[in-house]
Amino acid sequence: MTQVELPLFYTFHFYLFGLIAVVSAVLFVTRKSPVAAALWLVNTMFCLAALYVLLDAQFIGAIQVLVYAGAIMVVFLFVIMLLNLGHPSELADARGLGWKLAAGFVGLALLAEVFTLTRSKIPLKFLELKPGALATQIATEGAIAPVAKPLFTEYLLAFELTSVLLLVAIVGAVVLGRRTKDAG
């Protein structure tokens, strides 16, 4: 397989948005305030959408912004506000030294796996496409069909289970919110 040289514009912006996404994800995990954490997650989602656009997947980038940075984050913020968790200093923080060490170990293990996969000489045949295969598929089926067809055929069960899981989470938040309101 031949290596294609990308213009400096794409390379620079890929690393820029990638770095911002990683920093935002780290800030998302380390914030004590759930609202601040949710806003950092929104920033991460926007950076991922920019990466999709750079990879010439504009439809996926738009869906990333509309669905995840828009709708799902509104639901998250709604649930956070519904629970009315109060001031962050009043909350018990379960992130002690042991949890931080465990998270650091898991993060290092994941980085080692990514490094090993990028340096391995094993050909990843399932990732290789014939030149022009994607353009041919988009020309014949359009840009949305290659995404929608597997989503609503072979991955339909996972798609539906995810929607039910989100619904259960919202109902659970409403029940918890009413229980604390009645007790107070």
Image (cartoon, grey):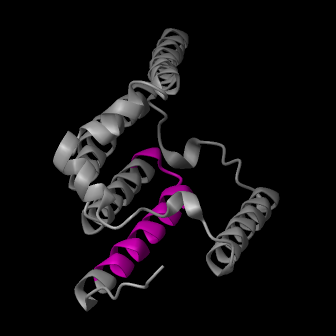
**Magenta stretch bounds:** 13-35
**72 sits left or right of 104 in the view:** left
Residue at the outermost top position:
182
Task: Classify residue 5 by image quadrant.
Answer: bottom left
Residue 47, how many percent across, how many down? 33, 63
Q: Is residue 16 magenta?
A: yes
Residue drawn at x 27%, y 69% as measured from the top left:
54
Q: Main secondary structure of the magenta part?
A: helix
Residue at the outermost right position:
98
Q: Is residue 13 above or below residue 73?
A: below
Residue drawn at x 35%, y 54% as measured from the top left:
45
Q: Is residue 73 above or below residue 184?
A: below
**24 sits left or right of 149 in the view:** right
Residue drawn at x 42%, y 85% as measured from the top left:
3
Of residues 59 and 28, the one drawn nearer to the viewer in this rendering: 59
Answer yes or no: is residue 148 visible: yes
Residue 178, how many percent across, how many down? 47, 12
